[in-house]
Amino acid sequence: MKTKAVRLYGKNDLRLEEFELPAIKDDEILAHIISDSLCMSSYKAATQGSEHKRVPDNISENPVIIGHEFSGEIVEVGKKWQYKFNPGQKFAIQPALNYKGSLNAPGYSFPYIGGDATYIIIPNEVMEMDCLLKYQGEAFYGGSLAEPMSCIIGAFHATYHTIPGKYVHNMGIVEGGNMAILAGAGPMGLGAIDYAIHRDKKPKLLVVTDIDEFRLKRASSIHTVEEAKKRGVELKYINTKDIENPGEYLISITNRKGYNDVFVFAPVRAVVEQGDKILAKDGCLNFFAGPTNPDFSALFNFYHVHYLSTHLVGTSGGNTDDMIKSLQMMEKGLINPAAMITHIGGLNSVVNTTLNLPKIPGSKKLIYTNIEMELTAISDFKKKRKADPLFTQLAKIVEKNNGLWSIGAEKYLLKNAKSI
């Protein structure tokens, strides 16, 4: 079977190509990809080439398919896995396989599996590690965004607090406590707000800060103060840009008690240090943002570490259990990652978008791999109505959904867009 895919050959060398897939082995699965969400990790892999820890040394001769936040349908199942999987099933994949200690992962390391393709072959190790996950949600974009949502869920699980007088850690956030999400109006911050409000174990106070007023207003229109209140959470959005002493102001909101849980969503020294300053006794700072600078550092108050038991934790991605949790919550309608999506494109737009990802404003760029469509901001659908009739209906659909991507928009696009 032929597939079209974006393959990595070297530093900044991405190519959209059509090639023949081999017949699947008894321990493999043939799958049809429908959607893939582009990630900064793919940008890092594309710009670093074989210097990236997950990318093989021989990609110039044996290129790999990029993309690791993908969803689709199973087409054919090898004999070994026919007891567990069937053709027609929707799926998502946990790319962090950790197979026999290897860093190899779909979207980085394999010639026949990655999200930016029409058809792929899922190798045995994915199933061996229980990383091929059944997905019963209606929207394929939900399956694509389950991986970034799992990173958020993993961060909430990794946060910890201590039991006074005992050397025991209580894992997770403080239920009914004070939480701050700093620099939290971006795509991952929106997911964190959604999860914090709709999970079982919630904070009583949730403060979200940013210095971009537009992003804050968008966030507050998606995850409203009213909705949070219904869920028992007092939600506040605060622009700290013009506040003379933002740390002091944030503490004042808590009646000077401070924050039990602080999540830092930007690799900025001042933001990290602000998070440290607002921690309550036994407060945990979760450094969520992944810096590109290996020498990134910030000051941390070790007097408070010693006497107030403050602590620091960081995670790089979620595990399979976290991803299953994200899929289940989406299937039940408890969380909706559509708020993360700001751009839609076809497979033909992947190369340019991936190589320029840091320069493109907005949040998640969602690719539908079987169509041809230039990357387009959802907010620009109205502008493109005259140039392309496809956008006339898409603009109407998203407008009725508070400007957000939706299952209705996905279905219309898949039915009416030009095939690649």
Image (tube, rainbow, N blue to C red):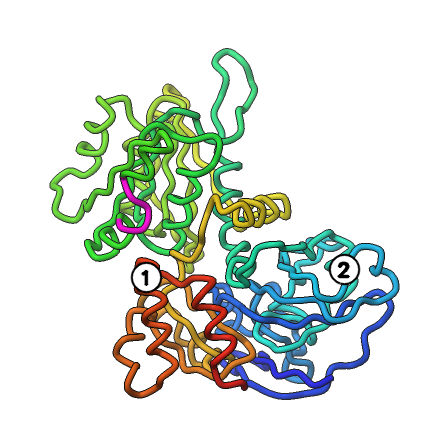
Residue 97 within the magenta-colored segment of the rendering:
no
Mark carried by residue 125: 2
Pick whichever, 14 or 309, lies toward us. 14
Magenta: main secondary structure: helix
Q: What whole-number distance in Å separates the C-alpha atoms at marks 1 and 2? A: 43 Å
Label 2: few (<14), some (14–19) or many (≥20) C-alpha neighbours in 10 Å: some
Task: Identify the disc placed on residue 287.
Answer: none
Q: Give percent across and percent down for residue 376.
A: 36, 76
Horizontal relation, residue 51 to residue 253: left or right: right
Can residue 274 be seen by looking at this rendering?
A: no
Residue at image coords 55%, 76%: 369
Numbered mark located on residue 400 in the image:
1
Does residue 214 appear left or right of residue 78 in this picture?
left
Which residues are drawn in magenta? 221-225
In the rendered view, does 410 fall on the left or right side of 307? right
Image quarter of residue 273: top left
- Please provide percent x and percent y for residue 243: 13, 42
Q: Can residue 33 be seen in this snapshot?
A: yes
The N terminus lies in quadrant: bottom right
Tag count: 2
Q: Residue at x 57, y 55 (%)?
A: 137
Residue type at mark 1?
Lys
**Left or right of 270 in this view: 14:** right
Which sits earlier in the primary sequence, circle 1 or circle 2?
2
- Callout 2 secondary element: helix
